[in-house]
Amino acid sequence: MFAKRNSLPKPFGKTWIKLFVLLFGIFMVTTKVTDADLLDMESIVDNYFRSTTLDFSNRQTANNYQLSTLFNVVGMIPGGFQVESLRVNNDGEMDIDYQITSLFNLGDNNLCEVLDVKVMNDFKVIYDGKLKDLTLSSRTQSEVHDDLVLFLYLNSSDTALTNKTCNFNVVIQSVVENTGFVDEEIIQNQVSSGTWTQWQKWYILILC
């Protein structure tokens, strides 16, 4: 004969099921987690974020107006030169390192390559050489400016250079390393040569 299997009374079984459902519901509400069995939370405190600006502009030194064209020379002859001034103004909140270079556009390459330029900053010569090789690096602090004086001149008396035109840009680019901040300004320039004869060539050379 088999022994009769004991079982829980029916009322006790229903109470146990209700109690399980209640406890499970409380667990789900208090853990605030769904669709996951494990929870790990890390807090990073004392965070700080500050926005800033990188911006500079080319200005006229006489009136601080925006500058888009620097040199516009007509009829330059051997020994002739033109003087212009340029203000590199730091309009942003960051100290910047910037570089000045020249870039030839349309025109006669022979004339562009023989043009010379001298650059002064605070009455000191910081570059004196060929326009094509112009490369300058400097640094300005926030809300400070650099005043530059540029001398553009023609020393060559080669008559093959008469009635030629050179178009070039002065490119000023600022970069703050490891930040991704970049700003670039372009100033347009044009120089056209005049006419001189072989006789005038030697006369000019004597005067120079």
Image (cartoon, rainbow, N blue to C red):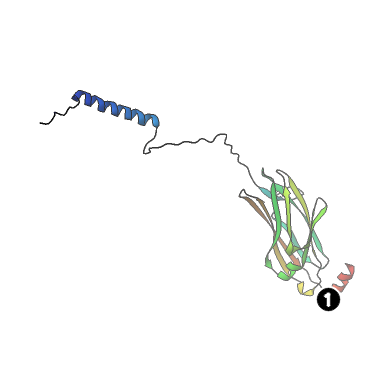
Q: Where's residue 85, x and y in %?
A: 77, 54
Direction left: furthest residue: 1
**Image height check: is 51 above or below 130?**
above
**Is the residue marked by circle 1 packed among few (<14), some (14-19), or many (20+) residues within 10 Å?**
few
**Residue 100 seen anywhere in this rendered image of the structure:** yes
Q: Residue drawn 73% across and 44% down?
A: 144
The quadrant in which residue 194 appears is bottom right
Q: Residue drawn 84% across and 73% down?
A: 201
The quadrant in which residue 149 appears is bottom right
Q: Where's residue 66, x and y in %?
A: 69, 50
Q: Where's residue 190, x and y in %?
A: 72, 63
Q: Quadrant of the N terminus?
A: top left
Direction front: furthest residue: 1
- Where disc 1 sits, the SS reads helix
Q: Where's residue 45, x and y in %?
A: 55, 34
- Name the side, left or right, on which 4 lies relative to 59: left
- Name the side, left or right, on which 151 lies relative to 24: right
Q: Quadrant of the C terminus?
A: bottom right
Which residue is label 1 attached to? 198
Q: Nearer the viewer, residue 198 or 88?
A: 88
**Image height check: is 93 above or below 153?**
above
- Name the side, left or right, on which 101 lies relative to 37: right
**Image height check: is 139 above or below 8?**
below
Q: Residue drawn 32% across and 27% down?
A: 23
Give amino acid for label 1. Answer: Gln
The quadrant in which residue 7 appears is top left
